[in-house]
Image (cartoon, grey):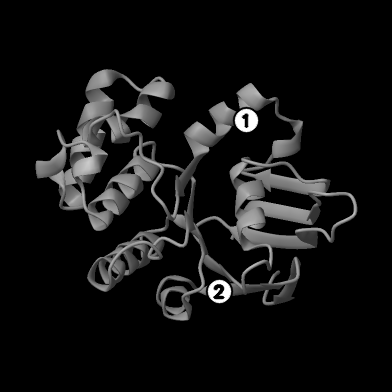
Amino acid sequence: MAGLVRLAAASKTYEPASPPALDGVSIEVGAGEAVAVMGPSGSGKSTLLNLIAGLDRPTAGTVEVAGVNLGDLSERRLAMFRRARIGIVFQFFHLLDELTVRDNVLLPAQLAGTPTRSARARAAELLEALGIAERAAAYPARLSGGERQWVAIARALVNRPDLLLADEPTGAVDARTGAQVTEMLRDLGRSGQTLLLVTHDRALAERCATRVIELSDGRVAGAGS
């Protein structure tokens, strides 16, 4: 299994006098693998995800995705790479309130330069598959938490990313929607989508992932390589 994500002695320190949020982490995630990252609050889970997403840069070490060292990219090229290759599902959705459901999903495809007809067809396909096609013209303020999460997932998938990152994807939805999101992520993993989950939910990790990486105090505590 080819490595899609590689971290080599990656560290991140936010304040010089403070302990590192991530401390010399070396892990690899293979293409088509579904991996969960678990650990208590403050263990470095979100920092790890942000480094892999290219939303932050390591203080030391390297982070590679699809053979590209993210540290070698300018901010502009990093944004373009992330848009084309990485999908991100945030815990609190991060939808744009001034855009409709359809336009929130379309935005990454438009920014990537996807032809309008293809982008609209892909967005419609995802909204239908996720059961929210009838909400395409609604604005986020009119949606339930569960509906917002489905929109966020559709947006993350619209560009058919090599890597899907999910940060506590069931943490802000009700139990019924959480179960549905869990099954959808499980199906994506089984279909060959490379998936990296950050979660506190052991049941979600065991259901969706084939491997769990445990973090503690910014370091890999188990099953990391």
User: Which residue shows up at 59% across the image and 59% down it?
Assistant: 30
Observer-nearest of 3 and 10: 10
Image quarter of the C terminus: bottom right
Which mark is on residue 211? 2
Residue 141 vs residue 206: left or right? left
Observer-nearest of 8 and 203: 203
Horizontal and vertical percent position of residue 69: 72, 39
Which secondary structure, mark 2?
Answer: strand
Q: Quadrant of residue 81?
A: top right
Q: Is residue 3 visible?
A: no
Query: Looking at the picture, which amino acid does disc 2 mark?
Result: Arg
Image quarter of the N terminus: bottom right
Q: Does residue 177 sit above or below 160 in this rendering? A: below
Q: Is residue 49 visible?
A: yes
Q: Quadrant of residue 76?
A: top right
User: Which residue shows up at 84% across the image and 61% down it?
Assistant: 19
- Cα distance in 3D space between marks 1 and 2: 28 Å
Q: Does residue 161 sit above or below 203 in this rendering? A: above
Horizontal and vertical percent position of residue 24: 83, 60
- Crowd band around label 2 with a 10 angstrom C-alpha radius: few (<14), some (14–19), many (20+): some
Q: Residue under circle 1?
A: 78
- Crowd band around label 1 with a 10 angstrom C-alpha radius: few (<14), some (14–19), many (20+): some
Observer-nearest of 111 and 151: 151
